[in-house]
Amino acid sequence: MIEGVDTIAALAMPRAVLNALPHPVLTIDADNYIRDANQAAEQFFQSSKSMLARHDIGYFIPFGSPFLSLIGQVREMDAPVSEYRVDIGSPRIGGERLVDIYAVP
């Protein structure tokens, strides 16, 4: 607990920091379902956090995308992986979308 800060405020701080980031951040579970997303991710995927949580990442990312293999690579190696200029565009989220990906276990 942070001295002088009540429990509710202390719990809200990490969420506020995550939402202050200008980059989309997703938490993906072992079944590839989206479990959490910051506000930048909601804007990027044009979906609310609750809508994102109803689907696995493959719903938003096109089949065969390097993004999906990166998730597997991170799990297999149990180490962070970076990839640059990955196109994750799809009809669901719009045309060409080049992104830099940093994935961690």
Image (cartoon, helix red, strand yellow):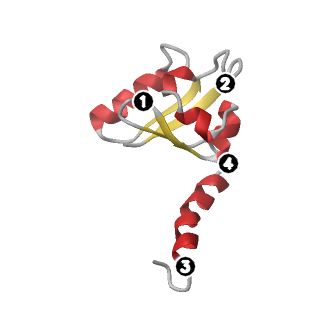
Disc 2 and disc 1 in contact, CB within 8 angstroms: no
Real-space CA distance between mark 3 and mark 1, rounded to the nearest whole angstrom: 34 Å
How packed mark 3 is, by other alpha carbons closer than 10 Å (few <14, some 14-19, many 20 or more), is few
Residue at position x 67%, y 43% from top?
40
Residue 32 marker: 1
| SS under mark 3 | loop
Amino acid type, residue under disc 1 in the picture: Asn
How packed mark 4 is, by other alpha carbons closer than 10 Å (few <14, some 14-19, many 20 or more), is few
| SS under mark 4 | loop
Residue designated by label 4: 22
**Disc with the residue nearer the chain's start (2 vs 4):** 4
Give the image location of residue 75, x and y in percent: 32, 34
Amino acid type, residue under disc 3 in the picture: Asp
Residue designated by label 3: 6
Residue at position x 28%, y 35% from top?
77
Q: Give the position of the N terminus as an image quadrant.
A: bottom left
**Disc with the residue nearer the chain's start (3 vs 2):** 3
Nearest to viewer (mark 1 / mark 4): 1
Nearest to viewer (mark 2 / mark 1): 1
Residue at position x 53%, y 31% from top?
54
Real-space CA distance between mark 3 and mark 2, rounded to the nearest whole angstrom: 41 Å
Real-space CA distance between mark 1 and mark 4, rounded to the nearest whole angstrom: 23 Å
How packed mark 2 is, by other alpha carbons closer than 10 Å (few <14, some 14-19, many 20 or more), is few
**Disc with the residue nearer the chain's start (2 vs 1):** 1
Q: Quadrant of residue 43?
A: top right
Amino acid type, residue under disc 2 in the picture: Arg
Disc 4 and disc 3 in contact, CB within 8 angstroms: no
Q: Is 77 on the left-hand or right-hand side of 28? A: left
Residue designated by label 2: 97
